[in-house]
Image (spheres, rainbow, N blue to C red):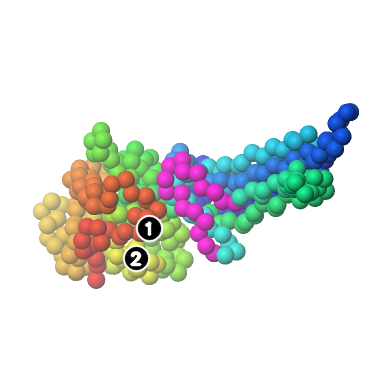
Amino acid sequence: MKFVDEATIDVVAGEGGNGCMSFRREKFIPFGGPNGGDGGRGGSVYAVGDRNLNTLIDFRYARRHEARRGENGRGSDQYGAAAEDIVLRMPMGTIITDTDSGSVVAELLVPDEKVLIVKGGDGGFGNLHFKTSTNRAPRQKTPGWPGEQKKLRLELRVLADVGLLGMPNAGKSTLITAISNARPKIADYPFTTLHPNLGVVRVAPEQSFVVADIPGLIEGASEGAGLGHYFLRHLQRTHLLLHLVDFAPFDDSVDPVAQAKAIAAELKKYDASLFDKPRWMVLNKMDMVPKEDREKRVKDFVKRFKWKGPVFQISALTREGCEPLVRAIYDHVAKLKNVVPDDPDPRFTDGISAVEAVGDAPSAT
């Protein structure tokens, strides 16, 4: 299925049914009085977060969603029936924005939570509604009220605990395959990953976290080069970033330190808050580095990069060092989740940064 994380749709709520003007007319019943009923309410449009969806592709082709109008009122005290509501199921993490005002209508962060997008119009009043002791034969009625309509922009930001960063061919897809249930495409050429991939990492039967893999970043990504900048928004909800570095590039002229600095610079240009998130350095492809040279090369990398945060040495291909990394990630994520109040509403806790909750995050200089 094609991955789509942006879409623009038109939503129109139904208008209310018209009120009815009618009088009771039966044999032997003079002055029957008014009996015109009110019109029915128009249908509203709701959005619901569905954890089984991971793309907005359905809204790329179905761009207009219009609810039906309510039924008109009728005589004999009959009120019009209300129209059925429309429920739009969207992936978790979808942000719904009104394109005209630029305001956020809703963020779908709670599974199966029903959020009103546009409200249907109320039904009009029949002349039964205007009956009083002094106005026994009212001839007033009102039309139904129009429903709301909006043009909305849908933006998907995947909900993940950990995000993977790195140059193309740094081994991000291989790592997420080694530690999770995700099976992204893996090949020996750049930009194999064309869209974000999510994987659930099981540490124990009741211990798990979600990892997000995005296309590789290259120098100049913040200005639009490559594909990675387009998907960086999917890392904004993560609690931890793993910066993967190809520690054994095929080309000897490629410097891992220069590549790591380029990624850090592009991340800071794109979003300073994303740059300030806790970030761990993961040196990949250590199986291609002789064991006697590993310690020396790692110390040289840390010194030249001036890195003060955690450093992990792994081989995603052979899974060497992956288990300690997974355990450390889970401990970090679990600690972060335990500092927030019990049963919080994610809409109010999503803005809490990992720096505030856990402490100073490692950063590159």
Q: Which residue is mark 2?
A: 273
Q: Is residue 162 visible?
A: yes
User: Would residue 153 be counted in the magenta stretch?
Assistant: no
Q: Residue 264, position in %: x, y? A: 31, 66
**Is disc 2 placed on a helix, strand or loop?**
helix
Query: Can residue 174 be seen?
Result: no
As drawn, the residue found furthest toward the top would be 27
Position above or below: 322 against 231? above
Which residue shows up at 40% across the image and 53% down it?
347
The residue at the point 61 percent across, 42 percent down is: 86
Give the percent coordinates (x, y) of residue 290.
15, 52
Q: Position of residue 96 (x, y in %)?
A: 52, 54
Q: Which labelled disc corresponds to residue 60?
A: none
Q: Give whichever of discs 2 and 1 has the lower sequence position.
A: 1
Instruction: Check contact, mark 2 vs mark 1: CB within 8 A.
Output: yes
**Residue identified by numbered label 1:** 236
Residue 178 is drawn in which quadrant?
A: top left
Identify which residue is drawn at 78% across, 38% down.
35
Observer-nearest of 331 and 324 = 331
The kind of residue tagged 1 is Gln
Q: Which residues are magenta?
A: 102-118
Q: Report x, y in % for residue 308.
A: 17, 65
- On screen, residue 268 above or below 89: below
- Image side of residue 234 versus residue 70, left or right: left
Taking the view exactly as shown, the residue that stands out farthest to the right is 27
Depth check: give the residue in front, 139 or 105.
139
Q: What is the number of callouts on the image?
A: 2
Residue density around tag 1, few if under 14, some if 14–19, many if 20 or more, within 10 Å? many
Which amino acid lies under the numbered mark 2 shown in the image of this protein?
Answer: Ser
Residue 109 part of the magenta segment = yes
